[in-house]
Image: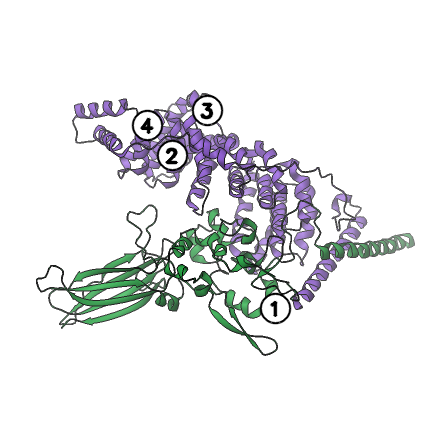
Amino acid sequence: MSTCVDDRRRAQAFVGSRAALWVVLLLGSVLQGCSRDAAVQPSPALRPKYDVPPLPELALESRLPVFEARAAKSVADVPAAKRQELVEYFELAHSESASGRTQHRARSAFTEAELAPRVLEWITTEHEDARLRALAAFELGERRTIGATTVLLKRLKYEVDATARVEVGAAVVRLGVESGYEPIDAALRDPGHVARERAGTLVLELAKEAAATLPEQPTWEQLQVFVAARLEAWRQNGVVPAGAHGDDATAEHPLRAARLARLFVDLQGFQLRPVDDARFMLARAGKLGFDDLRLALGASEVHLRNHALEVLRGLGKVAHELRDHVRPLLADPLSRSMALRVLGAIEDREALPWCRELLNDGDLEVRVAAATALGTIADAGAKYLLFAIAHDEAEVMDLRVAAAASLARLELERPWWRWLVEARKAGRYHKETLDELLDSIDAEVDRSRRR
Amino acid sequence: MIAIVRATLGLVLVGAGVGAALWLGSGEAAETGGDPGGQGGAKSQWLSSVQCKDCHADVWAEWHGSHHQIAYLNPEVRALSEDFRNKDCQACHLPVPISMTGYGTRTLPRQTFPDEGVSCLTCHLGKAGEILGRNSVPEAPCKPVANTDVISMGLCESCHNQHQTTDQWRASPQAAAGTSCNDCHMPEVERRLGDGSTRKGRAPRYPGAHDAAMLRTSAKFDVTVVAAEGGGGGREIELRLENVGAGHNFPTEERHRAVDMVLRFVDGEGKASEWITGYRFRQPYRDEKGDNTQLPAGEAKAVRIAVPEGAVRAEARLWYRLTPYVEDSDPKCTLLEERSVDLR
């Protein structure tokens, strides 16, 4: 019974504080001659009506069979004996102790083998010798083995050898996925990096292949600027200009498509490692994964559509073209809060009416996500809605923090930034979450100032 | 001047009137928990475990401080998940109510109430916003509705089969005997009710890898002197561990967890040898070589180590390590058993 009493008290406190706030704000706005922009919306009855269009229809279908059918077009593993034979040729071809003639013959035998690309994938992934892994990755890139795209993207996650990482990155770039510049960027920025020289050489080669302009004898700084620009362009576009790494890079490729589909099949079950791997790869694959992601967004299998949303959130603005497939999920009880966060991350301004409206939803998760999305989309029109929430001491702290963080984003720091810092100092909310929020706001402010 | 005062008073009165109207309007919205979005979704008056505290203070106190409650705060977990930048970890360390995604399937992450981790509502909030319990109690403020899922293994499985623990349980003698997760991990307690009577219940403390007493009941450690295999008059020490108490592998769950049987010999002058690892029970990390050597429920593993010449005593220890590569002195290690065998 005491819970009921407390609930009522809480509700009264909530209502009382809101009423007082509305009166003060209303009087303030009248006395200051403010426009109706300054007024907040106190109740459904009196709140000015936003024009909230109806949500697109939510139509979910089972999509796992589609992914399974697509993934079935992948290739079988190379038989162990054949693989071993080819691995030995490759080892011999790169052996420092073998004679030139032996190296040449081993090289020819390996190159002529039909299964060589699949064995190169195995060496890149499994071989104990990091030098051979790096050489195999290089060769996959040189051969434009488009089917190996996901294999190499996954290797970006797990390769620990510094030189091999740079080679894997370059190979990924050569296959038309310029997120592969990430390890090259890291190597160029670190004067003590063991593969810095190699990274510089690779950038020169990659720039030439992409017909990009670089000075003949570029400085380290010029190389860094070039790579940073390519990475930023990739984040913005998710695709390379046609022909940048050979025409094949953007063309349909059955094995690459099958392996991308496999990433969605592997999401089933309890294991989280494949889920994390898939997200890592898809978040770096740019628009290559869009066809599958579009399909997954309409899946009746909850983990498929939520996974697609997670990936889109990581991709950010480049995923803007998938907004029409995200919006219907605002009506899906299991993914609406994540859908809101994605619409925020991809900066879908047309979704603002729904975001504002969902600030008043019955589900706290949804309200928090809506408050966050309004900040990431930078909806200045929602400032006073957020202001009222952040000020309302009867509101749940999670929601107040989300509203304050969005206000801090909108106002590019003070005074809500200070409010968050104070909340952290006073231990009023989870410290690590506040740390993360403040860091992301700081980064945004930095970016804005640079712009 | 008078006109200004009048205008101001008028505004104050208008403001007060509007405020009263708003108060009433807001009150209605707050009490009904309306859904202006009208988009559906789980709506409930139950948001936080704190709401359970008033009526269930003892249960709340048992849960508070448990590894379920600190699931999202635990520094060990935060370090391993890179402060949850690895978002997949969040689904189990800060989950939505399991009923939403279904029992026995993977769950989804929530973003609110980080300090409650796996909260009361994670297990007890139903899909329609109702409270689920062992029994229906319509007269209680939270009006729990009887539901067998909340006491089923499927509830635990959504997170605890990530490392095959519930699969291991299915294959165990305990499962065959009808022993469930709650029988061990929610110990029975007697609770005093308001009228002075008592009632048996189960405490949501979830003892496990961090509970030395529970770990000690999991396995039986034996150290014996045996004749060396192949004869020759030599002797060997047999270290044997039998999983007698855990209804799953020992250790289970995380790949960090390790159980070590170690041994050292002491000579006639009291000089002790280095500790020798007789056997390590553990599932290696994915990028480590080696097999899964966890000890399944009901099974035993024995290893033998030759007694060196001059040894007068053998000392054996059984360690449980929360992470595999730490010194014995590290607080992440628990000494489960210590034995000494006279070899004279």
Q: Chain of mark 3?
A: A
Q: Is residue B52 above or below residue A225?
A: below
Report the coloring of the rendering: by chain
Rendered location of residue B57, percent (x, y): 57, 69
Name the N-terminal-most of marks 2 and 3.
2
Give the number of the disc on residue A199. none
Same chain letter for marks 2 and 4: yes
The kind of secondary structure element at disc 2 is helix
Q: Which chain is green?
A: B
Asked if residue B277 lies left or right of residue B233, the reply is right
The kind of secondary structure element at disc 3 is loop
Amino acid type, callout 3: Glu
Q: Chain of mark 4?
A: A
Q: Determine which residue is flagged by label 1.
A: B55
Q: Chain of mark 1?
A: B
Q: Determine which residue is flagged by label 2.
A: A151
Rendered location of residue B107, percent (x, y): 51, 50
The answer for how far apart the CA atoms under marks 2 and 4 are is 11 Å
Q: Determine which residue is flagged by label 4.
A: A117
Same chain letter for marks 4 and 1: no
Name the N-terminal-most of marks 4 and 3.
4
Asked if marks 4 and 1 touch (Cβ < 8 Å), the reply is: no
Q: Is residue B75 above or below residue A311?
A: below
- In the image, B228 versus B67, the foreground residue is B228
Quadrant housing the C terminus of chain B: bottom left
Amino acid type, callout 4: Pro
Q: Determine which residue is flagged by label 3.
A: A252
